[in-house]
Amino acid sequence: MALPRKVLMKKAQRFESRELQKNQIAPEHLSDLDELLNNVYATNRPTLGDYTNRVDIIRVFNVMAKEIYGKMDPPVVKGFGSFIMDLYSSGSDLDLSINFEISESFPREKQMETLRKFTRKLYSLRRKGHVSNIQPIMHARVPIVKFMDAGTKIECDLSVQNLDGILKSRLIHMISAIDERFQKLSFLMKIWAKVNGINSSKDKTLNSLSLISLVAFHLQTRNPPILPPFSCLFEDGTELAAIEKKVNGFLNYGKENKESLGFLFATLLIKLISVKNLWAKGLCASIYQGSWISKKLDPHCGFINVEDFTDRSENVSRAVGKREIQRISDLLSCSICALVSFLGGMLPMPQLKHLLFDPKSCPRAIKDEAENLTGTRTVVPYSSRNVSSCQVKKRLRNGNTRGKQATDPWEARVERKNPQSNPWEERKNQVDQHSRDSWNGWGANNKLKKYKLSYCAASGSCQAQKLTWEDKIVLSKYVPSPACQPGVTRSFNPSPQQRQGHQPILGSSSNFDSSHANSSAAGWSSWPSLSLANSSAAGWPSRPSLSSLLNRR
């Protein structure tokens, strides 16, 4: 049963004020946080090559549509999602929609029939090595076909007549012109969610539209507001020309608000953690009205309620599961504690960057390497089931690092008999022992076939990462390099006989080079092997991308 709107608004404001008092944001290091966030933003922005590769894929599918339906009245393939919103990075996927010029609704049966025609075409391209990982998903709410461009490694989702997704993408792109902080904060939140594994509807977590909507809602509820309610932009309808005219009238709408990017990032996380117990009571974030409302959108999946700004009866966060909402809350608490420690001078900037935006480059549990200004060793304040956030912060203030250590909720749950043992050292010793005994593939141990080992010099420990589909293609016999040294990953040198036979060699993930997008190798009668770094010099053929089809035509 949803509570009344006024009651929920008062509770939300009171809980947010309480969290802000509990996690006070020190202004002394806000400029450093702004510098860190701007650096992450600039580093992860796409290059011109990333843009060109995606445009070429869209062009290839338009040519493919003409081959399937003829040149008289073929459908038009358009991109949408993060690519059109300008919120994509080099590793982002590409959303494609096959659009027919019809006014009536497009039934689900015709959508599936259209996808089957394009799937058959994709299978023929897979035999030539242009695409891989083709996965039709016809039972989804919106039928799609997933695949990956073999040359550029861009993952694509192909749907039919997704006009609503195209409309939302263009609207978000136009609204981003009102204030640049909206675009930057949305981009950073997507990176934060992606590296921590909470940015996927398939995994019952937050999708990109949910994150962007929450960022817009946060900027609408600042004092003074940075973005207007979307109802002001839709007064003349949802036609793109009318909305663009409205948007031009709201340019520099939030110029009176001088809050920095770092302050907005921290307060957004605090706002989300403060209302974690109110979602189930009917609290809903409405960017159409620009305020909290009471609305139980779906009684079966209302664990986070974010109103769709084009179809107000829908919940864009409907995919979030009951178990996943607790994991999201743990990540929010952990990130807030880390930000407060950094702003208080107790956590260095490199550690904060690794924790928030690049956890894969170092062990998930950051060691006790952070020292405060007095030189006292401190514990990075993580939220966990054993130690609460308040207890950890109290220990930091008192200089007490004894007691139960706070565990990192980001760290993969590793079952171990000895709770004092280090799983990374166990994996390192296990692989090293296996290398001394026998190197036949990854050996007879099934566990070793699921992981690859890399040594991190910054942390002084090994990481066991899951193998990708590329890594699983291994030789039956190979000779390993000497034992891992700090900062060096295992690499394998192919013999002349292996190189002549074009047999793929297993190495570190950095060895796989996906930059050979425009391969001009004559004919692809056989399956091309995986490309390695400097493959052209070694005589290894690179995998062709879809853009190479444009060159042949």
Image (cartoon, grey):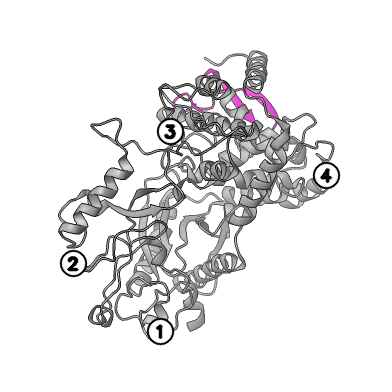
Residue bearing mark 4: 252
Residue 476: which disc? 2
Q: Relative to the observer, which residue lies in front, 36 or 530? A: 36
Secondary structure that dominates the magenta span: loop
Give above or below for 170 relative to 423: below
| Amino acid tagged 3 | Pro
Q: Which residues are magenta?
A: 280-305
> Foreground residue, 399 or 236?
399
Mark 1 or mark 4: name the one nearer the start of the chain.
4
Q: Position of residue 68 (x, y in %)?
A: 44, 70
List the residue tagged with mark 3: 409
> Who comes first in sequence, dot 1 or dot 3?
3
Numbered tag placed on residue 355 in the rendering: none
Q: How far apart are the alpha carbons under marks 1 and 3?
A: 47 Å
Rounded to the nearest angstrom, the CA distance separating label 3 from label 4 is 39 Å
Residue 303 on the magenta span: yes
Name which of mark 4 and mark 2 comes first in the sequence: 4
**Residue displayed at 72% across by 50% down:** 174
Q: Amino acid at mark 4?
A: Asn
